[in-house]
Protein backbone atom coordinates (compact mmCIF):
# COMPACT_ATOMS: atom_id res chain seq x y z
CA UNK A 1 0.00 0.00 0.00
CA UNK A 2 1.26 3.46 -0.88
CA UNK A 3 1.41 6.10 1.87
CA UNK A 4 -0.83 8.32 -0.27
CA UNK A 5 -3.67 5.83 0.34
CA UNK A 6 -3.51 6.20 4.14
CA UNK A 7 -5.41 9.52 4.41
CA UNK A 8 -2.49 11.39 5.90
CA UNK A 9 -2.20 15.18 5.75
CA UNK A 10 -0.32 16.78 2.87
CA UNK A 11 2.39 18.06 5.22
CA UNK A 12 3.13 14.52 6.39
CA UNK A 13 3.03 13.14 2.84
CA UNK A 14 5.56 15.80 1.83
CA UNK A 15 7.89 14.72 4.66
CA UNK A 16 7.41 11.05 3.76
CA UNK A 17 8.31 11.80 0.14
CA UNK A 18 11.38 13.74 1.26
CA UNK A 19 12.46 10.69 3.25
CA UNK A 20 12.11 8.65 0.06
CA UNK A 21 9.47 6.27 1.43
CA UNK A 22 6.80 5.07 -0.99
CA UNK A 23 5.25 1.87 0.31
CA UNK A 24 4.03 1.26 3.86
CA UNK A 25 5.40 -1.79 5.68
CA UNK A 26 2.89 -4.39 6.94
CA UNK A 27 2.85 -3.01 10.50
CA UNK A 28 2.34 0.53 9.17
CA UNK A 29 -0.42 -0.54 6.78
CA UNK A 30 -2.25 -2.39 9.58
CA UNK A 31 -1.90 0.09 12.46
CA UNK A 32 -1.95 3.57 10.91
CA UNK A 33 -5.66 3.50 9.88
CA UNK A 34 -6.66 2.27 13.37
CA UNK A 35 -4.54 4.89 15.12
CA UNK A 36 -5.80 7.65 12.81
CA UNK A 37 -9.33 6.69 13.86
CA UNK A 38 -8.31 7.35 17.48
CA UNK A 39 -8.33 3.72 18.64
CA UNK A 40 -5.95 2.21 21.16
CA UNK A 41 -3.62 -0.22 19.41
CA UNK A 42 -1.26 -3.01 20.49
CA UNK A 43 1.21 -3.59 17.67
CA UNK A 44 3.25 -6.79 17.75
CA UNK A 45 6.12 -6.89 15.26
CA UNK A 46 9.84 -7.47 15.10
CA UNK A 47 12.41 -4.68 15.07
CA UNK A 48 13.29 -3.16 11.71
CA UNK A 49 9.69 -3.23 10.50
CA UNK A 50 8.98 0.51 10.58
CA UNK A 51 7.25 0.80 13.95
CA UNK A 52 8.34 4.40 14.56
CA UNK A 53 6.38 5.63 11.55
CA UNK A 54 3.53 3.26 12.47
CA UNK A 55 2.87 5.17 15.70
CA UNK A 56 4.58 8.42 14.72
CA UNK A 57 2.50 9.35 11.69
CA UNK A 58 -0.91 9.07 13.44
CA UNK A 59 0.45 10.94 16.46
CA UNK A 60 1.86 13.70 14.25
CA UNK A 61 -1.44 13.87 12.35
CA UNK A 62 -3.41 14.48 15.56
CA UNK A 63 -1.08 17.17 16.93
CA UNK A 64 -2.17 20.78 16.60
CA UNK A 65 1.05 22.77 16.01
CA UNK A 66 -0.66 26.05 16.95
CA UNK A 67 -1.01 24.83 20.54
CA UNK A 68 2.20 25.49 22.44
CA UNK A 69 1.86 22.48 24.72
CA UNK A 70 2.91 18.86 25.09
CA UNK A 71 0.55 16.58 23.14
CA UNK A 72 2.52 13.37 22.55
CA UNK A 73 4.66 11.21 24.86
CA UNK A 74 6.85 8.29 23.73
CA UNK A 75 8.49 6.03 26.34
CA UNK A 76 11.48 4.03 25.03
CA UNK A 77 13.82 1.58 26.81
CA UNK A 78 17.21 3.01 25.80
CA UNK A 79 18.98 6.24 25.06
CA UNK A 80 19.78 5.08 21.51
CA UNK A 81 16.18 4.31 20.72
CA UNK A 82 15.00 7.59 22.25
CA UNK A 83 17.45 9.58 20.10
CA UNK A 84 16.63 7.61 16.98
CA UNK A 85 12.87 8.01 17.53
CA UNK A 86 13.23 11.73 18.20
CA UNK A 87 15.17 12.21 14.98
CA UNK A 88 12.69 10.24 12.88
CA UNK A 89 9.66 12.03 14.37
CA UNK A 90 11.38 15.35 13.72
CA UNK A 91 11.94 14.44 10.05
CA UNK A 92 8.36 13.24 9.60
CA UNK A 93 6.87 16.27 11.36
CA UNK A 94 9.18 18.90 9.88
CA UNK A 95 6.71 20.21 7.30
CA UNK A 96 4.00 20.45 9.95
CA UNK A 97 6.44 22.37 12.19
CA UNK A 98 6.21 19.84 15.04
CA UNK A 99 8.82 20.23 17.79
CA UNK A 100 10.21 17.01 19.29
CA UNK A 101 12.48 16.74 22.33
CA UNK A 102 14.36 13.71 23.72
CA UNK A 103 15.20 13.20 27.42
CA UNK A 104 17.43 10.39 28.68
CA UNK A 105 19.94 9.57 31.39
CA UNK A 106 23.63 10.23 31.05
CA UNK A 107 23.05 13.65 29.46
CA UNK A 108 23.05 17.16 30.93
CA UNK A 109 19.70 17.43 32.72
CA UNK A 110 20.01 21.23 32.91
CA UNK A 111 20.11 21.48 29.15
CA UNK A 112 17.08 19.20 28.90
CA UNK A 113 15.19 21.38 31.36
CA UNK A 114 15.89 24.47 29.22
CA UNK A 115 14.71 22.63 26.11
CA UNK A 116 11.52 21.48 27.84
CA UNK A 117 10.74 25.12 28.69
CA UNK A 118 10.32 25.70 24.94
CA UNK A 119 7.17 23.54 25.17
CA UNK A 120 7.78 20.80 22.58
CA UNK A 121 4.77 19.08 21.05
CA UNK A 122 6.29 15.60 21.61
CA UNK A 123 8.70 14.29 24.25
CA UNK A 124 10.55 11.01 23.72
CA UNK A 125 12.52 9.56 26.60
CA UNK A 126 13.66 6.76 28.84
CA UNK A 127 11.57 5.99 31.95
CA UNK A 128 14.20 6.93 34.53
CA UNK A 129 14.95 10.37 33.16
CA UNK A 130 11.26 11.05 32.49
CA UNK A 131 10.52 10.40 36.17
CA UNK A 132 13.32 12.75 37.16
CA UNK A 133 11.74 15.53 35.14
CA UNK A 134 8.27 14.74 36.46
CA UNK A 135 9.54 14.96 40.07
CA UNK A 136 11.29 18.25 39.26
CA UNK A 137 8.04 19.52 37.67
CA UNK A 138 9.94 20.22 34.47
CA UNK A 139 7.82 17.67 32.57
CA UNK A 140 4.08 18.04 33.01
CA UNK A 141 1.87 15.49 31.31
CA UNK A 142 -1.62 16.95 31.90
CA UNK A 143 -2.02 17.89 28.22
CA UNK A 144 -0.80 14.61 26.67
CA UNK A 145 -3.29 13.25 24.14
CA UNK A 146 -1.25 10.34 22.69
CA UNK A 147 0.87 7.98 24.78
CA UNK A 148 3.25 5.51 23.10
CA UNK A 149 5.06 2.61 24.78
CA UNK A 150 7.78 1.53 22.34
CA UNK A 151 9.47 -1.86 22.69
CA UNK A 152 7.43 -2.56 25.81
CA UNK A 153 8.88 -6.06 26.29
CA UNK A 154 12.39 -4.59 26.40
CA UNK A 155 11.33 -2.10 29.09
CA UNK A 156 9.85 -4.88 31.21
CA UNK A 157 12.95 -7.01 30.85
CA UNK A 158 15.07 -4.07 31.96
CA UNK A 159 12.98 -3.62 35.11
CA UNK A 160 11.05 -0.50 34.14
CA UNK A 161 7.49 -1.72 34.84
CA UNK A 162 7.01 0.29 38.03
CA UNK A 163 8.47 3.44 36.44
CA UNK A 164 6.17 3.06 33.45
CA UNK A 165 3.09 2.69 35.64
CA UNK A 166 4.11 5.79 37.61
CA UNK A 167 4.47 7.79 34.39
CA UNK A 168 1.19 6.55 32.93
CA UNK A 169 -0.58 7.60 36.15
CA UNK A 170 0.41 11.21 35.33
CA UNK A 171 -1.16 11.11 31.85
CA UNK A 172 -4.86 12.01 31.45
CA UNK A 173 -7.24 9.04 31.23
CA UNK A 174 -8.81 10.56 28.15
CA UNK A 175 -6.00 9.78 25.76
CA UNK A 176 -4.99 7.44 22.97
CA UNK A 177 -2.50 4.71 23.93
CA UNK A 178 -0.33 2.89 21.41
CA UNK A 179 1.81 -0.03 22.62
CA UNK A 180 4.42 -1.77 20.49
CA UNK A 181 6.19 -4.96 21.47
CA UNK A 182 7.92 -7.83 19.71
CA UNK A 183 6.58 -10.41 22.16
CA UNK A 184 3.41 -10.52 24.23
CA UNK A 185 4.19 -11.86 27.73
CA UNK A 186 1.51 -11.68 30.46
CA UNK A 187 2.90 -8.44 31.89
CA UNK A 188 2.41 -6.70 28.53
CA UNK A 189 -1.14 -8.03 28.29
CA UNK A 190 -1.78 -6.70 31.80
CA UNK A 191 -0.69 -3.22 30.70
CA UNK A 192 -3.17 -3.51 27.82
CA UNK A 193 -5.97 -4.46 30.21
CA UNK A 194 -5.08 -1.92 32.89
CA UNK A 195 -4.17 1.17 30.86
CA UNK A 196 -5.82 0.78 27.44
CA UNK A 197 -9.41 0.98 26.24
CA UNK A 198 -10.47 -2.03 24.17
CA UNK A 199 -7.23 -2.03 22.15
CA UNK A 200 -7.06 -3.54 18.68
CA UNK A 201 -4.29 -6.15 18.58
CA UNK A 202 -2.26 -6.14 15.35
CA UNK A 203 0.23 -8.97 14.98
CA UNK A 204 2.73 -9.07 12.12
CA UNK A 205 4.45 -12.43 11.88
CA UNK A 206 8.22 -12.48 11.56
CA UNK A 207 9.05 -12.72 7.91
CA UNK A 208 10.68 -15.99 6.94
CA UNK A 209 12.85 -16.30 3.90
CA UNK A 210 11.49 -18.93 1.56
CA UNK A 211 12.74 -17.35 -1.66
CA UNK A 212 14.81 -20.11 -3.20
CA UNK A 213 15.48 -17.80 -6.14
CA UNK A 214 17.98 -15.86 -4.03
CA UNK A 215 21.45 -17.41 -3.86
CA UNK A 216 22.86 -16.47 -0.45
CA UNK A 217 26.61 -16.39 0.09
CA UNK A 218 28.97 -15.10 2.73
CA UNK A 219 32.62 -14.05 2.58
CA UNK A 220 34.71 -14.30 5.72
CA UNK A 221 37.20 -11.44 5.75
CA UNK A 222 38.81 -8.84 7.95
CA UNK A 223 37.28 -5.37 7.90
CA UNK A 224 40.16 -3.75 5.99
CA UNK A 225 39.95 -6.45 3.28
CA UNK A 226 36.27 -6.02 2.49
CA UNK A 227 36.43 -3.20 -0.05
CA UNK A 228 39.00 -4.79 -2.35
CA UNK A 229 37.21 -8.14 -2.16
CA UNK A 230 33.88 -6.51 -2.98
CA UNK A 231 35.25 -4.71 -6.03
CA UNK A 232 36.78 -7.95 -7.28
CA UNK A 233 33.40 -9.62 -6.86
CA UNK A 234 31.80 -6.80 -8.82
CA UNK A 235 34.30 -7.40 -11.62
CA UNK A 236 33.75 -11.17 -11.65
CA UNK A 237 29.99 -11.31 -11.08
CA UNK A 238 29.13 -8.34 -13.33
CA UNK A 239 25.85 -7.43 -11.60
CA UNK A 240 23.31 -5.41 -13.58
CA UNK A 241 21.83 -3.44 -10.68
CA UNK A 242 23.30 -3.58 -7.18
CA UNK A 243 22.53 -2.36 -3.67
CA UNK A 244 25.38 -2.25 -1.14
CA UNK A 245 24.28 -1.95 2.50
CA UNK A 246 26.49 -0.18 5.05
CA UNK A 247 25.97 0.14 8.80
CA UNK A 248 26.37 3.89 9.21
CA UNK A 249 26.06 7.13 7.27
CA UNK A 250 29.84 7.54 7.31
CA UNK A 251 30.26 4.05 5.95
CA UNK A 252 27.81 4.76 3.11
CA UNK A 253 29.56 8.00 2.15
CA UNK A 254 33.01 6.38 2.14
CA UNK A 255 31.85 3.35 0.15
CA UNK A 256 30.13 5.48 -2.47
CA UNK A 257 33.21 7.70 -2.88
CA UNK A 258 35.52 4.68 -3.00
CA UNK A 259 33.45 2.89 -5.65
CA UNK A 260 33.28 6.03 -7.75
CA UNK A 261 37.06 6.44 -7.46
CA UNK A 262 37.46 2.89 -8.78
CA UNK A 263 35.36 3.68 -11.83
CA UNK A 264 31.97 2.29 -10.82
CA UNK A 265 28.79 4.31 -11.26
CA UNK A 266 27.73 4.49 -7.60
CA UNK A 267 26.04 6.88 -5.20
CA UNK A 268 24.84 6.65 -1.61
CA UNK A 269 21.64 7.54 0.25
CA UNK A 270 21.05 8.04 3.96
CA UNK A 271 18.98 10.21 6.25
CA UNK A 272 21.21 13.29 6.07
CA UNK A 273 20.71 13.87 2.34
CA UNK A 274 18.40 16.62 1.14
CA UNK A 275 15.14 15.58 -0.48
CA UNK A 276 16.34 16.85 -3.85
CA UNK A 277 19.58 14.87 -3.70
CA UNK A 278 17.88 11.74 -2.41
CA UNK A 279 15.22 11.74 -5.12
CA UNK A 280 17.85 12.49 -7.77
CA UNK A 281 19.93 9.47 -6.70
CA UNK A 282 16.90 7.18 -6.67
CA UNK A 283 15.77 8.36 -10.11
CA UNK A 284 19.26 7.72 -11.50
CA UNK A 285 19.33 4.25 -9.98
CA UNK A 286 15.87 3.30 -11.22
CA UNK A 287 16.61 4.60 -14.72
CA UNK A 288 19.88 2.64 -14.96
CA UNK A 289 22.21 5.64 -14.95
CA UNK A 290 23.67 4.28 -11.71
CA UNK A 291 24.84 0.71 -11.34
CA UNK A 292 25.32 0.66 -7.57
CA UNK A 293 23.22 2.20 -4.79
CA UNK A 294 24.90 2.33 -1.38
CA UNK A 295 22.41 2.68 1.49
CA UNK A 296 21.75 2.35 5.19
CA UNK A 297 18.91 0.10 6.36
CA UNK A 298 16.68 3.01 7.33
CA UNK A 299 17.23 4.87 4.05
CA UNK A 300 16.30 1.79 2.02
CA UNK A 301 13.08 1.00 3.89
CA UNK A 302 9.88 1.39 1.91
CA UNK A 303 11.63 2.07 -1.38
CA UNK A 304 9.95 0.53 -4.41
CA UNK A 305 12.92 -0.63 -6.49
CA UNK A 306 12.73 -3.41 -9.05
CA UNK A 307 15.37 -5.10 -11.18
CA UNK A 308 18.03 -5.44 -8.47
CA UNK A 309 20.17 -8.47 -9.26
CA UNK A 310 22.73 -8.36 -6.42
CA UNK A 311 22.75 -7.26 -2.78
CA UNK A 312 26.08 -6.88 -0.98
CA UNK A 313 25.96 -6.64 2.81
CA UNK A 314 29.24 -4.81 3.36
CA UNK A 315 28.44 -4.92 7.09
CA UNK A 316 26.49 -7.81 8.55
CA UNK A 317 23.05 -6.48 9.56
CA UNK A 318 22.65 -5.24 13.09
CA UNK A 319 19.62 -7.41 13.70
CA UNK A 320 18.56 -10.60 11.91
CA UNK A 321 15.28 -9.16 10.62
CA UNK A 322 17.15 -6.48 8.69
CA UNK A 323 18.86 -9.20 6.67
CA UNK A 324 15.49 -10.38 5.40
CA UNK A 325 14.54 -6.86 4.34
CA UNK A 326 17.90 -6.31 2.66
CA UNK A 327 18.06 -9.39 0.50
CA UNK A 328 14.35 -9.12 -0.28
CA UNK A 329 15.35 -6.28 -2.62
CA UNK A 330 16.41 -8.89 -5.15
CA UNK A 331 14.85 -12.11 -6.44
CA UNK A 332 11.55 -10.39 -7.22
CA UNK A 333 8.94 -11.12 -9.88
CA UNK A 334 10.20 -14.65 -10.45
CA UNK A 335 13.72 -13.51 -11.27
CA UNK A 336 16.84 -14.84 -9.62
CA UNK A 337 19.08 -12.81 -7.37
CA UNK A 338 22.23 -13.05 -5.32
CA UNK A 339 23.23 -11.76 -1.90
CA UNK A 340 26.76 -11.67 -0.52
CA UNK A 341 27.38 -10.89 3.17
CA UNK A 342 30.82 -9.90 4.45
CA UNK A 343 31.51 -11.29 7.92
CA UNK A 344 34.52 -10.64 10.12
CA UNK A 345 35.83 -13.70 12.03
CA UNK A 346 34.38 -12.60 15.38
CA UNK A 347 30.94 -11.90 13.86
CA UNK A 348 30.33 -15.47 12.70
CA UNK A 349 27.85 -16.12 15.52
CA UNK A 350 25.63 -13.39 14.06
CA UNK A 351 25.70 -15.20 10.73
CA UNK A 352 24.39 -18.37 12.36
CA UNK A 353 21.52 -16.46 13.97
CA UNK A 354 20.54 -15.10 10.55
CA UNK A 355 20.66 -18.61 9.11
CA UNK A 356 18.28 -19.77 11.85
CA UNK A 357 15.86 -16.99 10.96
CA UNK A 358 15.95 -17.61 7.23
CA UNK A 359 16.02 -21.38 7.67
CA UNK A 360 18.63 -21.51 4.96
CA UNK A 361 22.39 -21.97 5.16
CA UNK A 362 24.55 -19.43 3.39
CA UNK A 363 27.21 -20.82 1.08
CA UNK A 364 30.80 -19.78 1.81
CA UNK A 365 32.27 -17.87 -1.12
CA UNK A 366 35.97 -17.83 -1.87
CA UNK A 367 37.10 -14.29 -2.59
CA UNK A 368 38.26 -13.90 -6.21
CA UNK A 369 41.95 -13.31 -6.75
CA UNK A 370 43.32 -10.17 -8.37
CA UNK A 371 43.99 -12.23 -11.50
CA UNK A 372 40.39 -13.50 -11.63
CA UNK A 373 39.06 -9.97 -11.15
CA UNK A 374 41.23 -8.71 -14.00
CA UNK A 375 39.94 -11.51 -16.20
CA UNK A 376 36.42 -10.34 -15.37
CA UNK A 377 37.41 -6.79 -16.32
CA UNK A 378 38.70 -7.98 -19.69
CA UNK A 379 35.47 -9.91 -20.27
CA UNK A 380 33.39 -6.81 -19.51
CA UNK A 381 35.59 -4.71 -21.83
CA UNK A 382 35.12 -7.22 -24.66
CA UNK A 383 31.34 -7.10 -24.14
CA UNK A 384 31.49 -3.30 -24.37
CA UNK A 385 33.46 -3.55 -27.63
CA UNK A 386 30.88 -5.98 -29.04
CA UNK A 387 28.03 -3.59 -28.12
CA UNK A 388 29.83 -0.64 -29.73
CA UNK A 389 30.55 -2.65 -32.88
CA UNK A 390 26.86 -3.50 -33.17
CA UNK A 391 25.90 0.16 -33.01
CA UNK A 392 28.52 0.78 -35.76
CA UNK A 393 28.91 4.42 -36.92
CA UNK A 394 32.63 3.83 -37.53
CA UNK A 395 32.89 5.14 -41.11
CA UNK A 396 34.37 8.52 -40.18
CA UNK A 397 37.14 6.82 -38.19
CA UNK A 398 38.26 4.30 -40.82
CA UNK A 399 40.90 6.53 -42.46
CA UNK A 400 42.50 7.14 -39.07
CA UNK A 401 42.34 3.41 -38.37
CA UNK A 402 44.20 2.71 -41.65
CA UNK A 403 46.99 5.08 -40.61
CA UNK A 404 47.31 3.37 -37.23
CA UNK A 405 47.43 -0.05 -38.86
CA UNK A 406 50.41 1.11 -40.93
CA UNK A 407 52.34 1.84 -37.73
CA UNK A 408 51.02 -0.80 -35.30
CA UNK A 409 49.75 -4.34 -35.45
CA UNK A 410 46.03 -5.03 -35.18
CA UNK A 411 46.73 -7.08 -32.05
CA UNK A 412 48.51 -4.18 -30.32
CA UNK A 413 45.68 -1.80 -31.19
CA UNK A 414 43.05 -4.24 -29.89
CA UNK A 415 45.08 -4.70 -26.69
CA UNK A 416 45.30 -0.93 -26.23
CA UNK A 417 41.52 -0.67 -26.64
CA UNK A 418 40.99 -3.30 -23.93
CA UNK A 419 43.50 -1.57 -21.66
CA UNK A 420 41.58 1.68 -22.08
CA UNK A 421 38.25 0.03 -21.21
CA UNK A 422 39.42 -2.34 -18.46
CA UNK A 423 40.87 -1.40 -15.07
CA UNK A 424 44.43 -2.59 -14.59
CA UNK A 425 44.87 -3.86 -10.98
CA UNK A 426 48.23 -2.07 -10.82
CA UNK A 427 46.55 1.27 -11.58
CA UNK A 428 43.69 0.97 -9.07
CA UNK A 429 43.13 3.98 -6.83
CA UNK A 430 43.89 2.97 -3.22
CA UNK A 431 40.73 3.24 -1.12
CA UNK A 432 40.73 3.20 2.68
CA UNK A 433 37.42 2.67 4.46
CA UNK A 434 37.33 3.73 8.12
CA UNK A 435 37.04 0.54 10.21
CA UNK A 436 33.87 0.00 12.23
CA UNK A 437 33.84 -1.76 15.57
CA UNK A 438 32.73 -5.39 15.21
CA UNK A 439 29.40 -6.29 16.76
CA UNK A 440 29.60 -7.28 20.45
CA UNK A 441 30.20 -10.87 21.48
CA UNK A 442 28.60 -12.89 24.23
CA UNK A 443 25.03 -12.27 23.01
CA UNK A 444 24.36 -15.30 20.88
CA UNK A 445 21.30 -16.91 22.44
CA UNK A 446 18.33 -16.96 20.10
CA UNK A 447 15.43 -19.36 20.26
CA UNK A 448 15.72 -22.31 17.93
CA UNK A 449 12.53 -21.36 16.17
CA UNK A 450 14.39 -18.97 13.92
CA UNK A 451 14.45 -15.65 15.71
CA UNK A 452 10.70 -15.05 16.02
CA UNK A 453 11.18 -14.15 19.66
CA UNK A 454 13.13 -11.05 20.44
CA UNK A 455 16.11 -11.04 22.69
CA UNK A 456 15.40 -10.30 26.29
CA UNK A 457 18.27 -8.04 27.25
CA UNK A 458 19.50 -6.43 24.14
CA UNK A 459 21.65 -3.63 25.38
CA UNK A 460 23.50 -5.31 28.16
CA UNK A 461 22.58 -2.94 30.97
CA UNK A 462 19.05 -3.74 32.05
CA UNK A 463 18.10 -5.54 35.23
CA UNK A 464 15.17 -7.83 35.83
CA UNK A 465 12.16 -6.60 37.77
CA UNK A 466 12.73 -6.31 41.47
CA UNK A 467 16.51 -6.14 41.12
CA UNK A 468 16.94 -2.37 41.15
CA UNK A 469 16.76 0.58 43.50
CA UNK A 470 13.28 2.01 42.90
CA UNK A 471 13.61 5.58 44.07
CA UNK A 472 17.27 6.25 43.46
CA UNK A 473 17.56 8.70 40.58
CA UNK A 474 21.25 8.00 40.15
CA UNK A 475 20.57 4.29 39.71
CA UNK A 476 18.05 5.05 37.00
CA UNK A 477 20.41 7.37 35.17
CA UNK A 478 23.19 4.82 35.43
CA UNK A 479 20.88 2.18 34.02
CA UNK A 480 20.03 4.45 31.09
CA UNK A 481 23.74 4.87 30.44
CA UNK A 482 24.48 1.16 30.81
CA UNK A 483 21.70 0.29 28.41
CA UNK A 484 23.71 1.89 25.64
CA UNK A 485 26.71 -0.36 25.87
CA UNK A 486 25.56 -2.98 23.41
CA UNK A 487 25.19 -0.54 20.53
CA UNK A 488 27.96 0.25 18.13
CA UNK A 489 26.82 3.02 15.86
CA UNK A 490 28.28 6.44 16.53
CA UNK A 491 26.22 8.20 19.13
CA UNK A 492 24.81 11.66 18.67
CA UNK A 493 27.81 13.28 20.25
CA UNK A 494 30.18 11.47 17.91
CA UNK A 495 31.52 8.94 20.40
CA UNK A 496 31.44 5.16 20.42
CA UNK A 497 30.64 2.91 23.31
CA UNK A 498 32.32 -0.28 24.44
CA UNK A 499 30.41 -3.49 25.08
CA UNK A 500 29.32 -4.44 28.57
CA UNK A 501 31.34 -7.25 30.07
CA UNK A 502 29.37 -7.78 33.28
CA UNK A 503 29.27 -11.32 34.71
CA UNK A 504 25.50 -11.46 34.20
CA UNK A 505 26.02 -11.37 30.41
CA UNK A 506 26.48 -15.11 30.20
CA UNK A 507 23.45 -16.02 28.12
CA UNK A 508 21.83 -13.15 26.34
CA UNK A 509 20.63 -12.77 22.81
CA UNK A 510 21.43 -9.83 20.57
CA UNK A 511 19.69 -7.29 18.43
CA UNK A 512 21.85 -4.25 17.79
CA UNK A 513 19.84 -1.23 16.74
CA UNK A 514 21.26 0.98 14.06
CA UNK A 515 21.81 4.40 15.56
CA UNK A 516 22.95 6.08 12.41
CA UNK A 517 20.37 5.61 9.87
Image: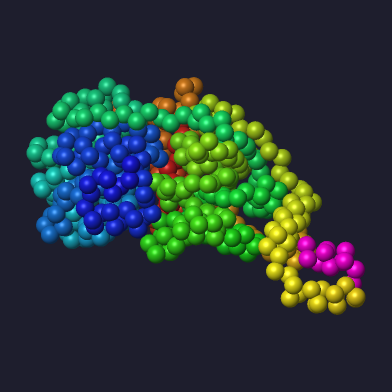
Residue 457, by quadrant, is: top left
Q: Is residue 110 visible?
A: no
At 21% from the left and 30% from the top, the residue drawn is 200
Q: Nearer the viewer, residue 437 or 430?
A: 430
- Is 42 placed left or right of 68 in the picture? right
At 26% from the left and 54% from the top, the residue drawn is 12
At 42% from the left and 48% from the top, the residue drawn is 303
* Vertical comparison of 41 with 87: above or below: above
Decide whether residue 352 is among the magenta residues.
Answer: no
Q: Give percent across and percent down for residue 199.
A: 19, 30
The secondary structure that dominates the magenta segment is: helix
Q: Give percent across and percent down for residue 201.
A: 25, 28
Decide whether residue 413 is among the magenta residues.
Answer: yes
At 16% from the left and 51% from the top, the residue drawn is 63
For the image, the number of numbered tags is: 0
Q: Nearer the viewer, residue 153 or 107?
A: 153
User: Which quadrant is home to the N terminus?
Assistant: top left
Q: Is residue 239 visible?
A: yes
Q: Give percent across and percent down for residue 377.
A: 73, 55
Colour mode?
rainbow
* Vertical comparison of 185 with 16: above or below: above
Q: Give percent across and percent down for residue 92.
A: 29, 54
* Vertical comparison of 19 with 6: above or below: below
| Range covered by the magenta-colored residues | 408-418
Residue 256, by quadrant, is: bottom right
Amino acid sequence: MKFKELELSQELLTSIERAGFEEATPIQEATIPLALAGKDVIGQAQTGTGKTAAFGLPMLQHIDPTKQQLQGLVIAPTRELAIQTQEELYRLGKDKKIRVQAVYGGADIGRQIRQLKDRPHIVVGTPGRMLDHIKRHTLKLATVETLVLDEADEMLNMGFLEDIETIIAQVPEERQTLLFSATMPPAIKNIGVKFMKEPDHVKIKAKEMTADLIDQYYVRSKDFEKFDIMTRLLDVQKPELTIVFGRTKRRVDELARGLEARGYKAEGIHGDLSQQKRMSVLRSFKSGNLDILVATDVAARGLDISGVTHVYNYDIPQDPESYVHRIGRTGRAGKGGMSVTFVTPNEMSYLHVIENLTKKRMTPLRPPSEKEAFKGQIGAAMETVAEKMTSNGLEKYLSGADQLLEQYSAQDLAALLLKTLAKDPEDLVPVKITPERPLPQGKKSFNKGGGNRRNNNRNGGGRREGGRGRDDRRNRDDRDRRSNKGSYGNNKDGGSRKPSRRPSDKKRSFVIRNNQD
